Image: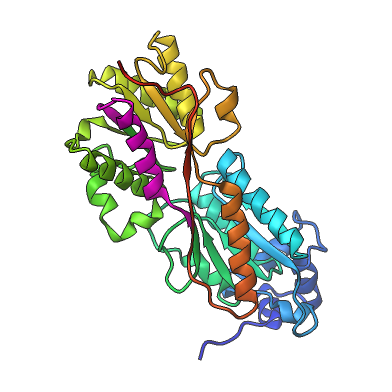
Amino acid sequence: MEKVVTMKDVADYAKVSISTVSRVINGKLKEDNDMVDKVWDAVDKLNYRPNPAARFMKGQATGTIGILLPDISTPFFTGIAAGAISRAQKKNNTIIVSSSDGSVEQEKKSLKLLSRSVLDGLIYCPIARNETFEEIEYFKNIPVVISYRRDIVPNIPHVYADNVKGGYVATRYLLRLNRKNICFVAGFWNLPDENADLVKMSNSPEAGFYTSLDRFQGYLNALEEEGIEYDPSLIFTSQYNHDSGYITAKKIIESGREVDAIVAPNDLVASGIIKFLDEQEISVPSAISVIGYDDSMLTSIMHPSLTSVNQNAKEVGEKSVDLMMKLLNDEYPDDSIVDVNLSIRKSTSFLL
């Protein structure tokens, strides 16, 4: 049986008093204190996790849920946070929001910091990465919900948008507009090797780690339905920001491949794509139609206004809290899938 690490063990390791350990863990000593560093070093080395039951009456919840998002500055994840906060408030709970800022290393640090907080549960939206989530062990004594990822951690409920449908409806709509040379841009936080085979990746057990792979599968489904052969020269990758969209659009045009439509991984990338095309005097939507993803507020202020897949970020956040409430009530909920739909605007048109 695994030995339970106590506050006394931490005090002995750090060579300080138990009261000092308690003050550090409860945030009553300044972080720039050498003694604080010694205590946190002992906490990490011994893998000590504060027990909420020791700080609250037995059976009494804290009313606090943590949520960790890949990048809170991205409109979609801001929407998830807004939905989670709104639903939690209706349940008389508070949400603590943390962001990984698009960095795996920062994500690991944020998980460690959250594990030191007194939480009833954690809503965790990981940065897409093909590796085991060992840090989830920090939270083995409280409920965890995985948000916006599919089938990545066994025995934990997941909430995610139907990204296969999202890729499908975007591609199918462009095909209905008589556009046959549709470029698909797959988004990644950390770009894969240039020779990466997305078809192979989308059929692997790790596909659920990457929303773009599900969307790519939807793209393939729409092409197959129309009897159009898959052309890997129409596949590009980007990160999830405006500048990456601009650079990717440049690569698409410089490739010399005939393109009459582009499906972007989010609205920020789509804005960068349209900016480059505008600078090259390539007309959007008549020459190249562009579809974004997220249906964020950017869609209405861009010129032309952006057709985009709405994946209902707020609902993802709300349902994440709903699953958490069920777990806290000793229920064992199934995964929850959020529907998507296409919001049509002026960045797409029929190809004459």
Q: Is residue 308 left or right of residue 55?
A: left
Whether residue 41 is visible here, answered yes or no, is no
Looking at the picture, tell me which residue is in the foreground, 131 or 15. 131
Judged from this view, the residue extending furthest toward the bottom is 1
The location of residue 18, given as percent across then percent down, is: 77, 78
In this view, 195 is above or below 153: above
Q: Is residue 162 magenta?
A: yes
Q: Quadrant of the C terminus?
A: top left
In this view, 268 is above or below 310: above
- The residue located at (56%, 87%) in the rendering is 3
Magenta region: 160-183
- The residue located at (55%, 65%) in the rendering is 145
The location of residue 190, given as percent across then percent down, is: 41, 43
Q: According to the image, what is the colour scheme of the structure?
A: rainbow
The location of residue 111, given as percent across then percent down, is: 58, 60
Quadrant in the picture for residue 216: top left
User: How many discs mark residues in the rendered view?
Assistant: 0
Looking at the picture, tell me which residue is in the foreground, 20 or 231. 231
Judged from this view, the residue extending furthest toward the top is 281
- The residue located at (80%, 57%) in the rendering is 30
Looking at the picture, tell me which residue is in the foreground, 237 or 160. 160
Q: Is residue 172 left or right of residue 329?
A: left
Q: Is residue 237 magenta?
A: no
Looking at the picture, tell me which residue is in the foreground, 218 or 116. 218
Quadrant in the picture for residue 261: top left
Whether residue 297 is visible here, answered yes or no, is yes
The location of residue 311, given as percent across then percent down, is: 50, 45
